[in-house]
Amino acid sequence: MYLASADRYEAMPYKRCGKSGLLLPRISLGLWQNFGGCVPFETSREMVFTAFDAGITHFDLANNYGPPAGSAEETFGKLLKQDLSAYRDEMVISTKAGFTMWPGPYGDWGSKKYLLSSLDQSLRRMGLEYVDIFYHHRPDPDTPIEESMEALATALRQGKCLYVGLSNYDAKQTKQALGILKQLGVHCLIHQPRYSMFDRWPEDGLFDVLKKEGVGAIAYSPLAQGILTDKYFHGIPESSRAGKNKDSFVAKRVTPEKVEKAKKLNKIAQARGQSLAQMALAWVLEKEPMTSVIIGASRVSQIRENLDTLKNLTFSAEELAQIDKILGD
């Protein structure tokens, strides 16, 4: 029987999520790529235990996480049932819907039919009565945004989630969605954008909207899927996902220009006593209104390295200027 570390809350700082009562750990664990049916259960188990023992209380999932889709939720549900049921009230568990899950016209995007059906399936896979946060995973260009927001509000009224969130909505879409939710008597807790040193689009208006409306932010892909580490300094490893699939999204993003910038950034990180990954996470956490950052992991050592980020979250004005110069070159 798993027993959580008695000192699990001593080292992790927590931050209030926007204008809400909910505190999130500065580092959260995402179960996107390495917790599905293709990964040994014991590997997933060890990573989740390592995270929770270090004070990571927030576990971020989605209906399509795996692979295959749905299997990450099944893995987490098995962990909850076997090992973590006693700690459910110490956890923030989130899931999302918005990408393709089943064939036909009701298994994708943002209709009320799809969003609420998907949430029911997610709850069954995890063996939960409710999730803490339910997100619309991406805006739907063909469904009225009012319908998608009504689906979030309905899930909240039904007690199937405690808070609602948005992901991948731009500034204009977010402002509109927040206004509709407010009319429905619902406060949006959080927005989950893709954000890193190499992907700064939320700075173009989104963060301003979130700060004005009191909505927290949590970044995904803060390491640009490994480009902001030393992983690609000597080419794409054959054993990596990008190495196995040269046509993959990640492989196409590993450009010589970005690798060269990463090497320059690494020199600043070394001067700070950090790895490039640690500095990249700290840089994201330094931004407002960033509440938390989602890390992914394929092994325990990566979680531990990322946790050491918390030892140095501050930047001098000179360091920030140097980083901006590298990123702008």
Image (cartoon, rainbow, N blue to C red):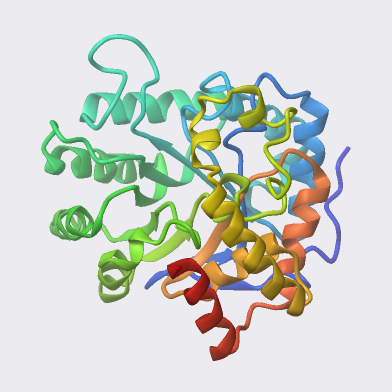
Q: Residue at x 73, y 41 (%)?
A: 84
Note whether 30 is above or below 171 in the view shown.
Answer: above
- Horizontal placement of 170 versus 256: left or right? left
- Horizontal placement of 255 versus 204: left or right? right
Q: Work out which quarter of the rendered image holds the N terminus and state it.
A: top right
Note whether 244 is above or below 15 in the view shown.
Answer: above
Residue 92 rendering spot, x and y as whole percentages: 56, 52
* Residue 21 shows in the view: no
Name, please, the residue furthest toward the bottom.
Answer: 317
Residue 187 rendering spot, x and y as whole percentages: 28, 61
Residue 118 rendering spot, x and y as whole percentages: 38, 26
Q: Residue at x 75, y 64 (%)?
A: 275
Name, please, the residue furthest toward the top.
Answer: 104
Front in this rendered view, residue 168 or 158: 168
Q: Residue at x 59, y 83 (%)?
A: 319
* Residue 133 shows in the view: yes
Front in this rendered view, residue 132 or 197: 197
